[in-house]
Amino acid sequence: MRDEVVIMEMIRRGDDDGFRYISDIYSPMIRGIIRKVYVKTGDFRLDYDDLYQEGLLALSRAVRLFDQNGQGSIDRYVYVAVKRSIIRKAVYYRKLYEHEQLSLDRDIFTDSSILFLNSARSIEDPKNRFRLKELKKALLALFESLDPLEKEILQLKREGHSYRDIADLLGCSTKKIDNLLQKVRKKIRKVCEGYY
């Protein structure tokens, strides 16, 4: 306990050696919490390194804020603080992925657009390059399977036309255009989900 008090004082004064020492001690705990978050959520799009960084930041805050008078064990305090912080970050990432907007204003069949859709993956990894090629094939197959009206609306949208312009060109309501584009977006998302 005496060593912990000395190390916490070093960290509070901004000593990097103290933080390196304490982070080495708590690193296995942080990694264990991240593994549990992965298993519990089943969402492997979460970035491990970002969650680990969040755990280290939470560790730093917990050590700086810990008060030996009345807060119990430093280990328990750090565990709870780090766990809450990592879970909060994981929830943030999941919401970000769930509400990620899919723009049809760009050509979704170019490599850069597919990278945008599949941004959690690194193009440098050969497995991810293979998955990117497979995703591109799947999106091209999807485009071929669209009915003629969906293809035409998608093409006009990719050319930069507004919903009103498309509706006027095709002689239908903007609501119909919106519904068909939402349907296409849903199909694209469904295809992309298999490659995350």
Image (cartoon, rainbow, N blue to C red):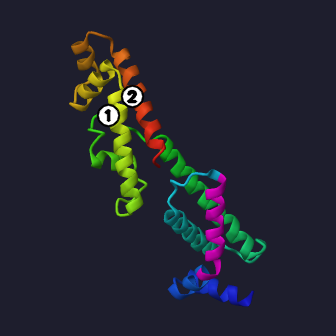
Residue 18 position, x and y percent, is: 57, 86
Q: Give the residue at x 52% y 63%.
A: 48
Which part of the image, by quadrant, shows the N terminus? bottom right
Disc 1: which residue: 104
The answer to whether one can see residue 14 in this image is yes
Q: Give the residue at x 34% y 46%.
A: 114
Outermost residue toward the top in this view: 171
Q: Give the residue at x 33% y 22%.
A: 150
Region of the chain picked out in magenta, as a range: 24-40
Asked whether 37 falls inside the magenta stretch, the response is yes
Residue 37 position, x and y percent, is: 63, 58
Asked whether 178 falls inside the magenta stretch, the response is no
**Vertical side of 190 occupied by 49: above or below:** below
Q: Quadrant of residue 64?
A: bottom right
**Vertical side of 25 occupied by 34: above or below:** above
Looking at the rendered image, the disc whose residue lies closer to the viewer, 2 or 1, is 2
Q: Front-most of 110 and 37?
A: 110
Q: Neighbour class for label 2 at 10 Å: few (<14), some, many (≥20)?
A: many
Q: Front-most of 159 and 162?
A: 159
Amino acid type of the residue tagged 1 in the rendering:
Leu
Count of number-bearing discs: 2
Q: Do the residues bearing badges 2 and 1 touch, measured as CB atoms within 8 Å?
A: yes
- Does dot 2 land on a helix, a strand or a loop? helix
Considering only order in the chain, which callout, 1 or 2, is on the residue closer to the N terminus?
1
- Does dot 1 land on a helix, a strand or a loop? loop
The answer to whether one can see residue 103 in this image is no
Q: Quadrant of residue 68?
A: bottom right
Disc 2: which residue: 184
